[in-house]
Image (cartoon, rainbow, N blue to C red):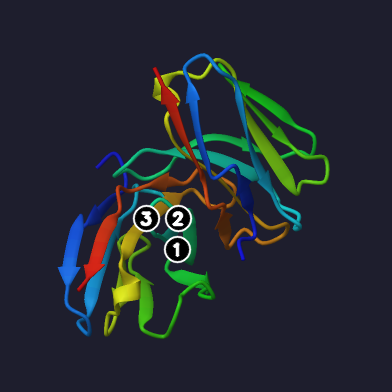
């Protein structure tokens, strides 16, 4: 596709369940970012991938959060034992790396009941 | 505490007015980017400023990067309803491109 895609667009889950969010970056983009955005707020950095490796995982809020990237392309963000405070929009972005422009996907809106 | 503080948080103005949005930090940034985000969509890059003191113009928008690379401003001349949205500043700290920090955003509403 031409842009960054994310799935699902919306996810409603019950507290305690695990969820997986997917990001398909722009083809050829080596850098991939995950962010979290609460309603009307700025973005909170979660994790950054350069290729398949994540040099900085310090943004992950707790050990319930994990992310992986395979083949230098698709990435999944997994949240285990979801809590209500995990409810937010999760945004993925990709770029050519460094200071290059980040292109964002439309996000996944996660609601934990 | 946000590393990048934006002000004002909310701004509601009439079409044709001018406005300035500020992005401040006590830390030095490699560069600062400005994004605009509309409801239900991801942010879209407007500009990147890299050099301290740099000024960039994009039609009615003027972006400035502070001399010390700790702050930036966005000035809009003769605002239009199409300028409505959430404006975000963001950037990596000096010598660390692994982590991008975003400001909390300025929600702009331009009334016709």
Q: Is residue A8 visible?
A: no
Marker disc for residue A91: none
Q: Secondary structure at mark 2?
A: loop
Which residue is the site of mark 2?
A: A30
Q: Earlier in the sequence, mark 2 or mark 3?
A: 2
Expressed as whole percent of the image width and height from the top left, the position of residue A103 reads 41, 44
Q: Is residue A34 visible?
A: yes
Please tell me which residue lies in front, A20 or B89: B89
Check contact, mark 3 vs mark 1: CB within 8 A: no
Which residue is the site of mark 1?
A: A51
Expressed as whole percent of the image width and height from the top left, the position of residue A72 reads 38, 62
Q: Secondary structure at mark 1?
A: loop
Which residue is the site of mark 3?
A: A39
Task: Name the side, left or right, on which B97 lies relative to A113.
Answer: right
Task: Name the side, left or right, on which A53 lies relative to A6.
Answer: right
Name the residue located 63 percent from the left edge and 22 percent from the top edge: B57
Label 2 crowding class (10 Å Cα cut-off): few <14, some 14-19, many 20+? some
Q: Quadrant of residue A39?
A: bottom left
Check contact, mark 1 vs mark 2: CB within 8 A: yes
Q: Earlier in the sequence, mark 3 or mark 1?
A: 3
Residue A52 vertical placement versus A73 (above, below): below
Task: Mark 3 vs mark 1: tell me if same chain.
Answer: yes
Question: Which quadrant: the C terminus of chain B?
Answer: top left
Q: CA distance from mark 2 to mark 3?
A: 29 Å
Q: Earlier in the sequence, mark 1 or mark 2?
A: 2
Q: CA distance from mark 3 to mark 1?
A: 30 Å
Question: Which quadrant: the N terminus of chain B?
Answer: bottom right
Q: Quadrant of residue B20?
A: top right
Mark 2 or 3: in front is 3
Task: Mark 2 vs mark 3: tell me if same chain.
Answer: yes
């Amino acid at each position: 596709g031409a842009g960054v895609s994310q799935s699902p667009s919306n996810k409603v889950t019950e507290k305690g369940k695990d969820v997986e969010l997917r990001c398909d970056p722009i083809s050829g983009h080596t850098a991939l970012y995950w962010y979290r955005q609460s309603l009307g707020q700025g973005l909170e950095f979660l994790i950054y991938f350069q290729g398949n490796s994540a040099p900085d995982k310090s943004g992950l809020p707790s050990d319930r959060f994990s992310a992986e990237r395979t083949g230098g392309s698709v990435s999944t963000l997994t949240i285990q034992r979801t809590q209500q405070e995990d409810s937010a929009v999760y945004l993925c972005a990709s770029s050519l790396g460094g200071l290059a422009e980040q292109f964002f996907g439309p996000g996944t809106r996660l609601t934990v009941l | 505490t946000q590393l990048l503080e934006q002000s004002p948080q909310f701004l509601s103005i009439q079409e044709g007015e001018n406005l300035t949005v500020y992005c401040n930090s006590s830390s030095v940034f490699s560069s600062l980017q400005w994004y605009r985000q509309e409801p239900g969509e991801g942010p879209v890059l407007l500009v990147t400023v890299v050099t301290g003191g740099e000024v960039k113009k994009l039609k009615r928008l003027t972006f400035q990067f502070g001399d010390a690379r700790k702050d930036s401003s966005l000035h809009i001349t003769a605002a239009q309803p199409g300028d409505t949205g959430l404006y975000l500043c963001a950037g990596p700290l000096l010598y660390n491109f692994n982590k991008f920090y975003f400001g909390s955003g300025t929600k702009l509403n331009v009334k016709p």
